[in-house]
Amino acid sequence: MNKEVRVRFAPSPTGGLHLGGVRTALFNYLFAKKHNGTFILRVEDTDQTRFVEGAEEYIVDCLAWCGIAPDESPQKPGAFGPYRQSERKPSYRQYAEQLVNSGYAYYAFDTAEELTAKRAQEPNFLYGQKSRMQMRNSLTLTQSEVSELLAQNAPHVIRIKMPANEQVTFTDMIRGEVTFDTNLVDDKVLLKADGMPTYHLAVVVDDRAMQISHIFRGEEWLPSAPIHLLLWEYLGWGDEMPNWAHLPLILKPDGNGKLSKRDGDRLGFPVYAMNWTDPKTGDLTKGFKELGFMPEAFVNLLALLGWNDGTDKEIFTLNELIDSFSVERISKAGAKFDFEKAKWFNHEWIKNSPVEQLIANVQTELSSAGITVTDGEKLATAIALVKDRCTLLSDFVSQLGYFFVAPQDYDISAIAPKWTAEKTNFFETFAQTLNIDASAAELETEFKALAESKSLKAGEVMLPLRMMLVGGKFGPGVFDIVKFLGKEETQKRIAYCLSKLNA
């Protein structure tokens, strides 16, 4: 690549960050790092009516959690700031006026009431080639009328003047050659009445000002491409135009169409990276992080929604993704989101992560459940025993909490109907003679030998022992648990359960 790679993720601070947005950020990041380029976060907050307090900080936190922090951002300014569009407001009007003066745009003085009335008359009304000469704008008013309205600061917008009967073509890095008919595109607003640009003008002006070389954005922006392509040409910047890549949609798991928050609510899984609380309503929308996903797994699963390296490999570290990433391997077709597959990724990451990497997260989960563990070595031992059984980080609470806090509830209903005095005698003897210095394997041998001497089958007493120690039918090897708990705690739990069974 000849020119320096500079890419940007440009979200609007309007709420939670959808996993599709995170994937867009990730693909930008991977491309930048693959080519020793720069990854930029630009906050597109020109629509002040939709601005939500705290949303920008939330976006920054999400990217940090995912490990894809930008090289330049509002929080880490570089030489191309400001990095919030609202702070770049003075730069936009001059370009909008330049477009008017060169005949590529025009002033529109139509009031909101006039537009509403027009839409009532024509249900599919579009402000464009067929209707612009019926409206109140600088194409239908005299020059003196326009000058007078501007002098009076009459509310107005600036609209692009879409050409008639033209084909706009560009080469998308994913889709190849894409062509648009300008007759099907309306005259979009470029500058609003409050002086703020719309996305269409701001994105072009800012991409040029920030020397963006490649644009990765969602497929839903494809219909806007002809407007942006023409603006690059009309502003005289055609030779500097970036390369474009429109990413495939992330689809609903049970049908066609883009995955939405509503789908997640309906099907019982999150679609946001992290918990988001709406500051206006107080409504909490859950995220992957709080559900118990590792960031490495979340990034891994997102990368494979619409991309693969051409092999059967599915587990990638971030560095492996950077090394393997290529635009040529991005699919044109949408990718269905599969939550069961997402959980599989997380299980694989938990299973294959070193214990040390899990300790902090597990401590957080345990603390949230009211379990305090101060002995890091014992916690590490417990994690090693159960991590293969955990799909979510939150599973560690049920899978190892009993190592540190005796169960409050014992599911003895499964063993109570077949309980006998002989079994009580067996467990009293086992507890008294427990040789905690023996290995787990040796303890199992001694346990089975004692059962045989009491004319009991090992299978009759193995499940009851597990119930007594952990409270249910789960957990790692039962004699590993005995070794972990130690003699005194094992005896205490056996005695407690025997009192319940013999009550």
Image: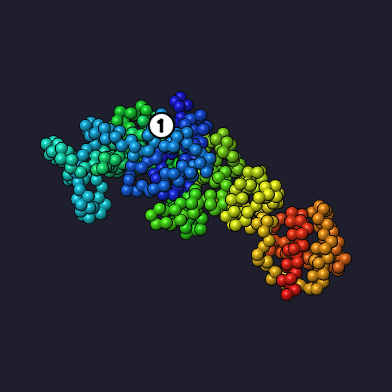
Q: Is residue 229 above or below residue 423?
A: above
Identify the residue at image location x=49%, y=44%: 62
Within 10 Å of disc 1 (Cα), the crowding (few <14, some 14-19, many 20+) is: many
Q: Is residue 174 visible?
A: yes
Classify the position of the C terminus by image quarter.
bottom right
Q: Which colouring convention does the figure follow? A: rainbow
What residue is rendered at 78% in x and 67% in y? Answer: 460
Q: Residue 317: image x %, image y %?
A: 59, 39
Which quarter of the picture shows residue 246?
A: top left
Q: Is residue 149 left or right of residue 12?
A: left
Judge whether 421 appears above or below 171 on screen.
Answer: below
Q: Position of residue 273 (x, y in %)?
A: 49, 48
Q: Is residue 421 left or right of residue 330?
A: right
Q: Mark 1: which amino acid?
A: Ile
- Spot occupied by residue 500 in the image (x, y as percentages of width and height): 72, 71
Q: Quadrant of residue 97?
A: top left
Q: Secondary structure at mark 1?
A: loop
Task: Look at 72% across and 61% down and name the residue there.
Answer: 469
| Residue matched to label 1 | 212
Q: Where residue 358 sits in the image (x, y, percent)?
A: 63, 46
Callout count: 1
Residue at 30% from the left image edge and 33% from the top image edge: 91
Q: Find the residue positioned furthest to the top.
A: 2
> Depth check: 77 or 466 in front?
77
